Image: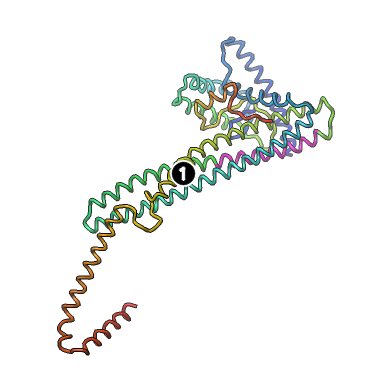
Amino acid sequence: MIVRILGEGQFDVEDSHLDALNELDSAVEAAVDSKDEAAFGPALAGLLDAVRSWGTALPEDTLVDSDLILPPSDAKVDEVVALLGDEGLIPDAL
Amino acid sequence: MRLRRRVTARERCGSGTRSFTSATASDAGLKGATDAMSIMKRMSMIFRAKASKALDKAEDPRETLDYSYQKQLEMLQKVRRGVADVATSRKRVELQATQMQQQSDKLQGQAQQALGAGREDLAREALTRRAGLQQQISDLQVQHAQLQGEEEKLTLASQRLQAKVESFRTRKETIKATYTAAEAQTKINEAFSGISEEMGDVGMAIQRAEDKTATMQARAGAIDELIASGALDDASGQPSDDIARELEQLSAGQDVDAEIAAMKAQIGSGDQPKALEGESGASTDQAQAKRQQEGQS
């Protein structure tokens, strides 16, 4: 599966890692839900590190969309909440 | 070689999407409907929704390709401007840090001068101000590191986008050349969703960098005003702060003392020969002064 870390690029990660990624993601989600900034930083770092070490960076000229997208490494809780909101922070593509 | 890798990645992506979907489906089946969708999955769906909404709006797919390419070029311009803007802010912070360091060194010198003149109170005042400046300098260093980080990130984003835009252009031409409606639609969707995600990512990176730079610009403006007002540095050469004024008075006083001492010495040693030798004494003095001058040079 293809995983994008915003601001960093895309990685190809073996599907077998999905469960482990979901587990790490739960910690991030819990921190976001409880707006716990102190827990959020390490949880996000753990998830991103897993993607970086298990995955292979895709060549820069690859044109594929990602199965999973992760917040940038220096993201804050509020930013992730906004990203997941209806309007979101993502600018229109077209 | 490049093309093959791209195809492979696409195939992998295709299978990855399928297996992920089935994995979440079985996951949800096991844990029940209350299982929340992961953050990472939700985010990718938001990006996809944006892309397909944009595609739906288009009437002719080929026009979509050209229009999207135009937008991509604009985004490339934007990210390059972003890099330049951040670099400008970084240089401004660098300049301010240098100016503050010079002022800090000056205060250090003043403290030493004051202590040498027996004015511990003045030395204390100078060192206190210097400590305040040092704090501001280390704040600036933190800002500088942040700006440098943003600059690097945007530079990399610009390189990635450049590579993808180039890849998109090639694909766009291929799709146009082999146009059969059904086949083209699939290829267009693939190319479009791939680039649109990157555009969203880069757009966000630019936005974040702009926000950070704007905050720092405001702070930098305040510091520039301080410098201009002479509170931090006196570029005019006129001592604007009391420490410099007092030290100047001190050293002026010392100069006067030294001159008086020198005059007294001259008068003391010059009295007797003048009385004995009369006018010829003056010429001897002149010769002596000339010799001294030559000796000095």
Residue at point 18% right, 89% down? Answer: B278
B206 relative to B97 in the view: left or right: right
Q: Tell me where residue B58 appears, x and y as whole percent.
A: 75, 27
Is-magenta flag for residue B233? Answer: no
**Secondary structure of the magenta portion, mostly?**
helix
- Label 1 sits on a secondary structure element that is helix
Residue at point 46% right, 50% down? Answer: B95
Residue at point 61% right, 43% down? Answer: B81
Q: How many marks?
A: 1
Furthest residue in direction top, as rendered? B32
Q: Which residues are magenta?
A: B151-175
- Which quadrant would the C terminus of chain B be assigned to in this image? bottom left
B129 relative to B275 in the view: left or right: right
Q: Tell me where residue A50 appears, x and y as whole percent.
A: 55, 29
Q: Tell me where residue B179 appears, x and y as whole percent.
A: 84, 31
Depth check: give the residue in front, B281 or A8.
Answer: B281
Q: Which residue position holds label 1?
A: B221
Q: Is residue A17 visible?
A: no
Q: Is residue B82 visible?
A: yes
